[in-house]
Image (cartoon, rainbow, N blue to C red):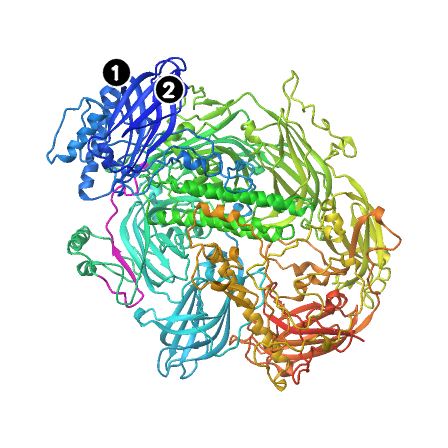
Amino acid sequence: MALSVGVRRLSCLPGHGERQVQLSFRGFTQKTRMIRCGPEGVFGELFRWPHYGKLVMGEMLSIKVYNCSKVFSNRLLGTLVLSLQHLMTSGRLILREALIDRNQRVTGIYIELDLRYQPPDGSAGTWVEEDFVYQMKDSSELIIRNPGFEEVEAAEAPRVSELDRRAAALGRKLVKGLETDDEEEEEDFYDVSEMEVSGIVFSPVKRYPWCALLSWALGWKVPACGGILHLLAFCFCRMSETFSLQLPQTGTVGDLLIPRARGHYLPGFPLLPLVGACSGPCRRRNLLTRVVFLCSRSRLCSTWDLFATPTPQSFQVGINIIEAQKLVGVNINPFVVVKVGEEKRHTATQKSTNCPFYNEYFLFEFHEPRDILFHRLIEISVFHSKKVPFLGTCIGTFKMDVVTVYSQPDHRFFQKWAVISDPTDTRAGVKGFVKCNISVTARGDVVGSLPTSSSSQAEDIERNLLLPKRVPAERPWARVCVKLYHAEGLPSMSAGIMGGFSKIIGEKKVFIDPYVQVSFCGQQGETSVETNTTEPEWNEQISFIEMFPPLARKIKVQVLDDANVGDVAIATHYIDLQQISDPGRNGFNPMFGPAWVNLYGSPQNSALRDIHKELNEGMGEGIFYRGRILMAITVEIFSSPSVAERKLGDKTKGALSKLKLKKKSKKSKEKAKELSQLQGEEEAEGSQEAEQPGEVTVEVEELHPLPKNALGRKEEFLLFAAFFEATMMESSLSSKPVSFEVSIGNYGKAEEVVTKVGRKVEKGEAKEEKQPLLDPGSDSELDVEVLAPASAALNKSVTKSQRPEPMEYDRSYSCLPMTHEKPCVYVWSYWENHTWRLCISNWIVKLAERLEQGLDDVEKLVRRSKAKAEERLREVLEEFVAGCRQYSLSAERKTMAHPNNLDRCRMKYLMRNIILYAKQGLRVRRRLTRANIKEKVKETRRVLAKLRFMAKEPQCTLPDVLIWMLSNNSRVAYARVPAQDILYSVVEEEKGKDCAKIQTVFMKVPGLHTGEIFAKLEIYMWLGVTKYAKNCLAELPEEFKYLSESGQEIAQLSAYSPPSRLSRDDFSYFQLRAHLYQARGILPADDNGLSDPFARVVFSTHCQTTRMLEETLSPMWNELLLFDQLIIDGKKEELKTDTPIIIINLFSHNKFGSPEFLGQAFAVPQVKLVDEPYTKPALQFFDFYKGTKAVGELIATFELIELDYSGYLEPSVPEDVEPKEPNYLGDPRAGWFIIPEGIRPVLKEFRIEILFWGLRDLKRVNLFEVDQPQVIIECAGKKVESEVIVAYKENPNFTEVVKYMDVELPEQVYLHPPLSIFVVEKRAFGRTVLVGTHVVSDVMKFSPRELEEEPEDVPKARKVSLQHLPSQTVVNIGPATGDPGPSIHPLSLVKAPLKKITINKLVKKDDEYEEEKPELEELDWWSKYYESLKELYNQTRSDEEDAENDDLNDAGESSSNTQLFCGEQTLEMMGEIRAFPNLLSPFLDGGNLHASSIDMEAEDEAVIEAEPARPKRKLITTLQIYNSELENEFDNFEDWLCIFPLHRGKATEDEDGNEDEHFVGKYKGSFYVYPTEEAGTEPKVSQGVPRNRPIKVLVRVYIIKATNLSPADPNGKADPYVVVTVGQEQKDTKERYIPKQLNPVFGEVVELTVSFPMESELTVAIFDHDLLGSDDLIGETKIDLENRFYSKHRANCGVASQYDMAPCTCGLTCFQMTSPYRRLSISSHDCLSGTRGEEELGHVRAAGWDMVKE
């Protein structure tokens, strides 16, 4: 056994002195430490007596309390002797007992103890709070009072009677076999000794004693005479007696309950963590906590947060049906039907075959929001055609939703086999396989090349099924049961004419007949209709039969109103199966609830003219609470066709009403009574096994209703909010009064409430009938009548109306005057207390927030050279690992109130994954170097995305808080705040990130897509159980006075009297200095492709504007904006970590209208308080966003300085701030200030050398062709003009190649201003016309490497990863693939001819071939090509397997036959374990994930060296095939000659718009930026550059094949041929077109002679051949030949590293090097684009571009 005694505290001690407690048990005495205290002493110590056998009758625990003295002997203050008999049966006691002196008299000293007993056989466990009856309202109720020593208070009499009533009710429930409906306390208690070894130092938080009310629940009356021993003796007697005994009760002990025993052990005392991240090496040693604060006010607004309605996008769903195999049937004529959503296509019919071949491609185009498309299903069905064409019997069907395809790599499945099964005969098994390609692409997606596959005929279908990764090939049938119990708080939908008529006559009738429609995987079921109610009770179950795991991710639950004409959607909710399941090895099936689901939708309660009715249908974010529904989801998997897991009696089965896809009528009482009788018989008779259903059906069945309060009794919650600021409001609101409404659920809504008659309503419950207040006649605004609710008199949810005032300095915006008084609102609501779910989610959210903040810092440091980005990333990873470790230690001790199955499984799932991510973080940190920092940031971002997904709580029972702005009795803007963000918890890490903090909230207009902010709020919010309401104002500054509604100051705050206003007279004044240096890459707003930008800086209630600079895309303001005497609310000590946000709005000046919005940036200032030393801030980068699109960046810094108001005059700037008075920029009368020295960059003279090469593809300007263009380069106010090209059509190159200019630029290279390129044309009469512009933002790439950063030392030892090592070849030409060679600046390269190497001297004679060498006459170019495809396919498959093995290793999943892949060799584990001990440790872990595994991972720092095995010689020399365009592989061939695209015109509003509309040509050239003192006589930019003169070259284009072409004929096919064009020369293969093919193999070679620079662009177009009419263009691609010709890569791009001795005997012999001037470069594919913008229309694969100089 193990006996644990926790000594908590002593109270009512006499005098002052040192106290000590001695505890004796079985002769062993233990003592507490001596503490010096007064009347109360807190010990908080835990003592254990380990296993010494079972407790026996009469065992006692003796406790003595002494007053210690160093001089005299210790004096005994009191004694307590406890009998441990009752502890044997209960497992735990928490008591508060009086001590007895030497004369056996009761003293006034009390001791609080926590006793636990764990028997050797585990027969008695510990108790948790859900085993008790009712929730405690006060911490004083958590202590057992001894009624023998207390006086009876009259005020407690009503409470005693209430407790008697509850205990009696519970006794009756226990007789019926129902569970108790109590709840656990949310506080956790941690063992001191265990927390000390955890490696993290915690700060203690206020302790709350555990609940320990003990009694029997069967209505027994407990005697109040005597002490706790009397009470225990009485309970023990009651256990042994079989008769009822009633004793007179004279005290008020209340009702006590005996809890159930639990197997797990709860630790002892609450040492609660204050923060959750730490820095320093995470080893087996103590770590000091690094405090990382999460910001509320300074959290930057996400670009997605400003969108209420999703934006439609263009999507293409392409499905290629290749063939079918093993179809069931005799003499069948199969054809395939493809259906996406509601669109349907079909293939041709193949006669009399079970293995038809189709190779037909279908393209479905959609323009709708992403979420809507992703819910659509893709169905592939095979039919047997009969005599009537395309009408046949279904052989089988395959279903998958679109989001499953889009979540795959490259958003597609390639050549996978879909398993066909018959939904009408589930026992028949597989009906065949269909091989297909499925792809889903959105406009703008980067699509990689199609993977290549081996053409082996004996393809393994079972291993290549159309299934996502880790989905088993054999999928059993399962029943998905959606249980719908009841709903509450639904709106009263007054739809149609009757609704308007009843409103006129004043009739208060509910016009709603709700029912629920559930859709899943193409199936749909509906409940019965409950008439004329807003609180329907269905108690029905909808069952779906589907293969498991299903290939559809979401279940759609929609509540509708039954109507005569058309049913109206009330609200829609989607349940993501990925959030309620875990597909891992130790995972769990989808499960949910029983839990409440909150519904959101439109604010309007009428279906007529509801402009936001799509929100009720699930399109976009709901902006109004529409009630909630109680539901559950279970999954039953059928293990075999004849045995099912679901157990139903035959009689019950016959009585259940099962209807397919039809609504049931209203249930009758007789039917319900009959059902309950039959279900009672079922329980008596026992269960019988039900067979698997023979077909896929939707069944609707009756359910037992859930017991009352099955999820716990409702508790009272308080929502408190104080408005500190309301700014950035539209100036149009300045003439109308504005107020704000705060609501949670239906509580707090500003609407009329009619209380139902004849029904008992508990206090505060939302059982009212709501009348519609929104006028359906308004189309633009949502009208509302602000009326006081009748039953919610205590709630104050709407602020007092105020008239907005213009903001200071710049009057472009309005604000509300809230300087002296802050309006407050408070709302009481009643919900089940399941806040522990949100507390766990909050912990993970804070882990993710800290990680994201750290990664943002790292990405900013990466932009700057010589910045310590690597060190910062190491710190971020250390903090993340420490936070994960802390979570894992605390989660093991977390208790749950009323957990369901999902809660239990999800807790283990979270624990397992958090530890896994911590190990991944340690692995990233270990492998981090300066060279791979960007790659590691991306890897950590992937971990962050998984963490964000895990943090989403699927069973969030608390509704979100909605804040509405009301103006002129209409709703104009809203903000939706998740309840968990403002939820209070006593544990700091479990508290919401914005709870009791002043947070910034951006209000948005319902239904708008634009990202502009309608208003900005600074609001303080708190949400929690009412018993914690005393903490709702704890975080406010002490300067505030609390005023009541009448304006009187509240002296004593209570839970039921929050303040109505906050007032303060003592202010802290600040000065904001906004240093705006420069903006880069902003949008063009004028027709000439330029803008006239200026910036508005908004902070608090102030707004200022910078200068307007004309015609530039890189404005250099160099300006200081001074905001003086600002009043900042909040605590000073929190301003450092939670600073108010600054908003920078960028505009372009418009002479004839309002300025045009160009973007928005958010910034956080650096805070300097009076008592802190002043340090000058450094310039930072801030991104501009317009919607979700990045539209430039800002270089600026901001500082917030507290003014010194210690003197008698006005507040002034502190003495150490420099400068106290800023200098003027230019004319002082203009009032512009310049950025002071120290912040403004130090300038240094740099030389910019410009290489003018030429202009290409210039478009017409004002209908005239460009003939005499000129290039102007501008930087930092200086310009360099090129020569004017006299005849652009004849020679578009420049003759004067190099020019330079000396400019003063910042010393830091990353601060260099952009280079602007202007191309103009000189026309008659001296006119100059702008052709196009380009802005070079990244000037660092044209600077010497030594200016950027210092090179990192090359490590001596190389680590061997689990990926494939590069294969060694026999004949090596040039450096190895993995060795990039010495780093040479591109501009210092000197061309040298390729050195001839005799191949015979390099080939070794004793090479060993992989297998038998083929005959020479069998080899040709196609042999090499297909062998290369096979090699690439095997490499891709092997990489996928390696990645999957790495994932399995991370998860700790080991298998007995694990292999380690290294190159093309396979090392069996049994023989090679010694060589790779650390690499194999993840395989041998066994899968046990716990907190200590993080430490084991942290200690594993070994570096392994291994020599790869030398591979055998290949039987066929292969080619290197690249998986993307060569421009992507070789940096656009811009090693010395760069291409700058030119654009002209105004930027379009459409984010998916086509940029080609503004493309006007290309400028070719380069730059070199270096300090002037390093300049020599010869320009550096032209070193190694060839002469700029016209040359002729011979170009051979080898066109192999095209893939995935867009269909151009009505039959879904195309007849493609190729057209190759250079300049005026054109060649095609029209005579050899390939009929009815979307993946044609051409095998063509085209030879052309071109002249540089006039003909430098090659166009490869694919046309569709038509017999009648002109041919249709499918798509085209353009290749710049000039850059490929002049590139240094042309000499070795695609050169084979291994050659055969004999040449190819047939085919295309294009891979032999015959001349030192002839160069070979093997290309992969180029994307084809056509008239449909940026949509991908296919790929063309070309084998080579041979260019021979003539």
The answer to which image quadrant residue 1394 occupies is bottom right
Amino acid found under the numbered disc labelled 2: Arg
Q: Earlier in the sequence, mark 1 or mark 2?
A: 2
Judging by the rendered image, the residue that carries numbered circle 2 is 19
The answer to which image quadrant residue 81 occupies is top left
Asked whether, in this view, residue 875 is left or right of residue 691, the answer is right
What separation in Å lies between label 1 and label 2 (alpha carbons)?
18 Å
Secondary structure type for disc 2: strand
Q: Position of residue 294 (x, y in %)?
A: 52, 38
Q: Is residue 597 above or below residue 217?
A: below
Which numbered tag is attached to residue 1474? none
Q: Position of residue 1655 (x, y in %)?
A: 77, 70
Residue visible at 12% across and 34% down?
241
Specify the segment rendered in magenta: 689-714
Q: Which quarter of the rendering shows the C terminus? A: bottom right
In reply to whether residue 707 is colored magenta, the answer given is yes
Q: Is residue 915 above or below residue 1076?
A: below
